[in-house]
Amino acid sequence: MAASGIRFNDFYFSEPIHLSAWAPPKCAGLFCILVDDPNWAPKSFQPLYFGEFGNNALASMILRDCGRTAVAAKGKTLFVSVLPMTFSTTQQRMALRDELIRAYNPLCQTPAGDAPGDLAFKLAELEKKHQEQMMQLLASANEAEAPAHRRRIGFVNDSA
């Protein structure tokens, strides 16, 4: 017997419906914002965003964090699918959400801890350190003066 809906990893989300017609369930769970994409199989829906919501959450509050999905959809209709997780904790839902993000790489999200600016920030910090070290190296090279008089290396000729 096949479960209805859409499967992500080992979890069955509800059948996708238009985002504009969606009202979140009264229980806690996860949601996925999708866009129709014929390249995805077995169902032609590509995930754009995975999110988590608590009990009696309002749709407007849930969707405020996923505003980039409309841009990523490029004019296509957005859909939503839900995985009810009654009696779950926020940490359990967030852990599953992060697992799904790592597995499916949705266009509007990056894995937890890998915010888009993190890589750029780390690169800028490395470049800054490199530049500081080069400046220190050049300064120390300029400060080192050649000694005024050095003895020549080698044997000294007695006749001289």
Image (spheres, rainbow, N blue to C red):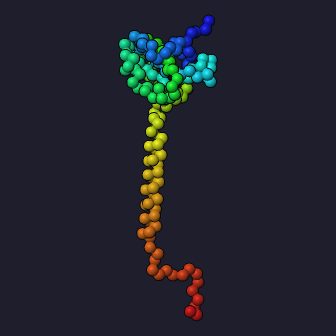
Looking at this view, is 69 or 106 the one in front? 69
Q: Looking at the rendering, in which quadrant would you find the C terminus? A: bottom right
The quarter holding residue 143 reads: bottom left
In the rendering, at what x and y percent does residue 69 appear?
47, 26
Residue 87 can be seen, yes or no: no
**Residue in the picture at 49% in, 31% down:** 110
In the rendering, at what x and y percent does residue 138 appear?
46, 64
The quarter holding residue 142 reads: bottom left
| Residue 59 position (above or below residue 152) | above
Residue 60 can be seen, yes or no: yes
In the rendering, at what x and y percent does residue 129 appear?
44, 52
| Residue 72 position (above or below residue 140) | above
Looking at this view, is 153 or 82 the one in front? 82
Instruction: Determine whether, in the image, residue 139 is placed left or right of residue 74.
Output: left
Looking at this view, is 6 or 29 the one in front? 6
Looking at the image, the residue that sits furthest to the top is 1
The quarter holding residue 56 reads: top left
- Count of number-bearing discs: 0
Instruction: Determine whether, in the image, residue 73 is placed left or right of residue 54.
Output: right
**Residue in the picture at 46% in, 75% down:** 146
**Residue in the picture at 62% in, 20% down:** 41
In the rendering, at what x and y percent does residue 1 appear?
62, 6
**Residue in the picture at 49% in, 15% down:** 18
Looking at the image, the residue that sits furthest to the bottom is 159
| Residue 130 position (above or below residue 144) | above
